[in-house]
Image (cartoon, rainbow, N blue to C red):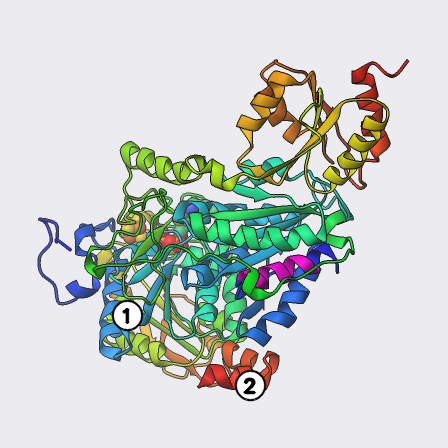
Amino acid sequence: MEPSARHMPHPLDDLLRVDRIPHIWCPGCGIGTVFSSCLTSMKSSGIDLAKTVMVSGIGCSGRGAGYVNLDSYHTTHGRALPFATGMKLANPELNVVVFSGDGDLFAIGGNHFIHAARRNIELTVVCVNNFNYGMTGGQVAATTPFLAKTTTTSLGNPDSPFNLPLLAFAAGATYVARWTVLHARELMGSIQEALLKKGFSFIEVLAPCPVNYGRRNKLSLLDTMRLYQQKTIIKNGASPTELDIDFSRGVVLGKFIDIQRPTCIESYDRTCRPQEIAEGKAA
Amino acid sequence: MTGDVACAEGALAAGCSFFGGYPITPATEIAERMSERLPEIGGTFIQMEDEIAAIAAVLGASCAGAKAMTATSGPGFSLMMENLGLAACTETPCVVVDVQRAGPSTGLPTQGAQADMMQARWGSHGDYEIIALSPMSPQEIFYQTIEAFNLSETYRTPVLIMTDEMVGHLSEKVVIPEAASIKTLVRPSAKGRKDRFKPYRPGENGVAPMAIAGQGYNIHATGLTHDERGYPVMTVEAQEEMMRRIKGKIRNNLADIIRTHSYRLEDADIAVISYGVSARTSLAAVDEARELGIKAGLLRLITVWPFPEVELRSLAERVKALVTVEVNLGQIHLEVERCASGKAPAILVGHPGGAIIPPERVIEKLKDIAGKNH
Ligand SMILES: Cc1ncc(C[n+]2csc(CCOP(=O)(O)OP(=O)(O)O)c2C)c(N)n1
Ligand code: SF4
Ligand SMILES: [Mg+2]
């Protein structure tokens, strides 16, 4: 694969489709940091990369699958999770990573999210939460803070956002963490743990969208980074009920949930298959 | 057994190992049968949270190498449309069964119709080709389900089985042949140097070999317009190239894809055109008409899409009327009329849905045309 002229060598080159660089992400966008953290963790975790796939939905974040040099599937808006579910069930040897945006995973795809977590299907879900629909020009999302301005809430968002870790926990996720792009080291640690976790893992990453969200809320990239630094509190094991995002009170980051319960496939094999077949499969 | 159960058995005989579903009358029995049978043979059944998820899971499973299917009825079929387009665009094999019931909307949930035929052709946005089959009996749905998988794998395209509540719930004798006597086909598989592989470079019949997840080809599949590397390219040229490929692989292989059955058509001067349950009505009507001295024959569409245009055009040249019999108010009829191009009148014997068309209505129409009604 020939890198394009504008591409400088990078340690993650083998995991990147360098012939697709430059990417579409705007200068100052947080998605790139989340994406490179994800690739770095894939490498460091020691998982078999030939058996690792990335599935995305639609959105700026959903373009992730287009840049990773692995089997990668850019699906429809909101449907990355059920697509990934079918993939994992059809070939349980695959490591399936879902990389997508907050709108994709929690608005149009919200129902799929709770069901994938409930089934405890073994997936690693990385959600770039930039508080809005970046790709379509900055509309309100299910994660947009109360009173924040977007193109469809020009006077302020009248609704309250989801607390994503609480939702993931309540639905049955076995691994739940939240970081920001400023916490890349912790984020990489979490993604690595999630990749090795036997169960449904969810990592929310707060990321700036300076072009569409920041601009309308008088938050320059630097302001956002300052918030991520000064208005966050790392509190591993915090109760998911304490995780509402309100920068005026401080936003809690950390690994909140890391538990074990039978995965979708384990349960299916045990419950639905005749014993010989279930054992044959395990062998 | 019923048509629904025979459909499930046909899928298993074809090598289906994944079913993603969501319950809906009158298709539920297909899911129920698959939920019992698949785990016994090492396959997987999953009831998803809705039909959007069901077809998405089917596509994921197919990309991971499984022969995969789902089954639904009108309301669920509508929900599946966006991802049906994804399957067409990414060239992902899958089989979707629509056991049609009367609509629109919730309609008559337990009563049949054939009113999703145009949705089957055009239901997802954008231009694409689709293959759709229409069985007239439980025995035929068994074979057509195998055929649907074979076509889907051969052409890397979604294939629809457009059956109806009447056939789905009809109980008739079904002979399941020895597995060894059943021809099952698999998609053309990726070969050669992994770093040089182009996932959308077509082979001889216009179909690109397919790499499945985990084989090491590092492929990219997207619903965006893409080039032969699978990479998004937002140009008119790339669009044209991709459209030529995904339409061409079907349009250039029509002789292999299209199946029809001609009954007493050789000397007919009135041609009845029908499919699915209405073909049963039509067969009875043709026999009865012949008794009355009316030279009627039946062209039964086994493949509904792509439409057997060549056959219809040549029929229109030599008969004095084309009578389409279908449980809707004129869908395939429009195609027949198009192909007739004014060479012969196209006449509809339709029905708003909820019941089969009695043969008498067809006979009356044939009598009218033959001038035997005074
Ligand atoms: C069915 C459907 N509805 C709407 C769209 C338009 N659309 C594209 S991306 C997007 C929102 C993406 O938001 P998010 O997932 O938060 O991703 P971001 O761009 O913010 O990274 C929408 C609404 C679409 N592609 N498909
Ligand atoms: S619009 Fe926002 S989310 Fe999308 S690339 Fe630009 S900065 Fe990133
Ligand atoms: Mg977003």
Examine the rendered structure and indicate whether residue B25 appears above or below residue A84. Answer: above
| Quadrant of res A257 | bottom left
Mark 1 / mark 2, whichever is N-terminal: 1
Kindly identify the residue that appears in the image at 48 percent across and 63 percent down.
A162
| Magenta stretch, overall SS | helix
Relative to A27, B223 lies left or right: right
Inter-mark Cα distance, 1 to 2: 29 Å
Could you tell me if residue A144 is visible in this image?
Answer: no
Image spot of residue B249 (x, y percent):
40, 40
Q: Which residue is mark 2?
A: A276
Q: Callout 2: helix, strand or loop? A: helix
Look at label 1 and name its amino acid.
Ala
Question: What range is drawn magenta here?
Answer: B5-14
Quadrant of the image containing the C terminus of chain A: bottom left
| Quadrant of res A223 | bottom left
Mark on residue A50? 1
Could you tell me if residue A23 is visible in this image?
Answer: yes
